[in-house]
Image: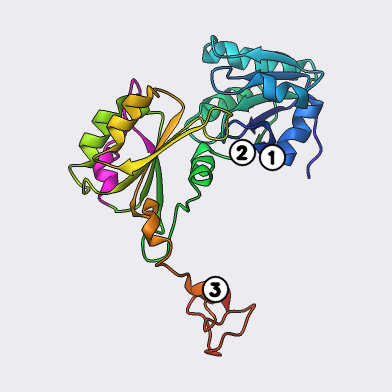
Amino acid sequence: MSRVRGGTVYFVGAGPGASDLITVRGARILEKAGRVVYAGSLVDERAMVELAPVARWVDSAGLNREQIVSELMDGARSGEVVVRLASGDPGIFGAMAEMTTELSAQDIPWEVVPGVSSVFASAAALGMELTLPDVSQTVILTRTAGRTPMPSGEGLADLARHGATMAIFLSVDRIDEMVDELLTVLSPKTPAAVVARASWPDETMMRGTLETIAPMVKASKIHRQAMLLVGKVFDPTLRAQVRSRLYAADFSHGFRDGTDQGTSPDPRLN
């Protein structure tokens, strides 16, 4: 593990909510932090503060980008270990790129510490895999257009045509619009689930299909911090039907001779 250095800004993924889902490396950096700038609307300070007992905690929920970057720079120039604590993973739907660009322009060193995304916590809460052999081996992480538009070709209908597992962030308040667009491509019977505040004490889960999930969400009054998961992999009846070739008794690879005594068609496993 790399040494934790003063005067450096660390972009640390806090994980989806539960304080024990932060990585070991992230916790080690927090322990040495002198300043933690966190999104109070998404990160539970009460759960995390014990990991950074000597730090000054700055809630960025009411700050703009320039003010956040100013806090990061001030701490680094004072020689502090500075943490920008992001929910989930800092590289997904964040502003890390623009902040690190400004830090680099001022010759302030920075480092990224990945975190557990809410998409993985949501799948774990459901007890489901995001990929299944012969069903879906592709996962699409996306959102819907809000005040920030989506690039051309990245609408939900465009992405749904791939038939892949879809994890839709930041959009549950537009559940009717999402479902309507997905139904232009997918069957109403397509499995769907919503997990709100995955791994938090008040975590909520709903399972259904594209024709049933919207009424469930509206009845629950969930309107933020929720993930919509869509795809055949969320059909519980498929779990008993699919089998991975990698673990089959007759499948040989570089670490095990199967009963076929052959070689894997995948050279990485020979």
Q: Gap in Å between the C-alphas at discs 3 and 2?
A: 29 Å
- Whether residue 150 appears in magenta in the rendering, the answer is yes
Q: Residue furthest left?
A: 184
Give the number of the mark in front: 3 or 2: 3
Dot 1, crowdedness within 10 Å: few (<14), some or many (≥20)?
A: some
**Disc 1, SS:** loop
Question: Which residue, given by chain and number where applicable, does mark 1 sit on?
Answer: 23
- Residue 160: tell me if it is visible: yes
Query: Which is more N-terminal, label 2 or label 1?
Result: 1
- Residue 87: image x %, image y %? 57, 29
**Disc 3, SS:** helix
Dot 3, crowdedness within 10 Å: few (<14), some or many (≥20)?
A: few
- Residue type at tag 2: Gly
Question: Which residue, given by chain and number where applicable, does mark 3 sit on?
Answer: 247
- Residue type at tag 1: Thr
Query: Which is more N-terminal, label 2 or label 3?
Result: 2
Range covered by the magenta-colored residues:
142-161
Q: Which of 235/142 is in front?
A: 235
- Residue type at tag 3: Tyr
- Residue 153: tell me if it is visible: no
- Residue 28: image x %, image y %? 78, 34
- Whether residue 128 appears in magenta in the rendering, the answer is no
Q: Which of 193/244 is in front?
A: 193
Q: Gap in Å between the C-alphas at discs 1 and 3?
A: 29 Å
- Checking the image for residue 59, the label placed there is none
- Checking the image for residue 115, the label placed there is 2
Q: Residue at x 51, y 49 (%)?
A: 127
Q: What type of secondary structure mainly makes up the magenta span?
A: loop
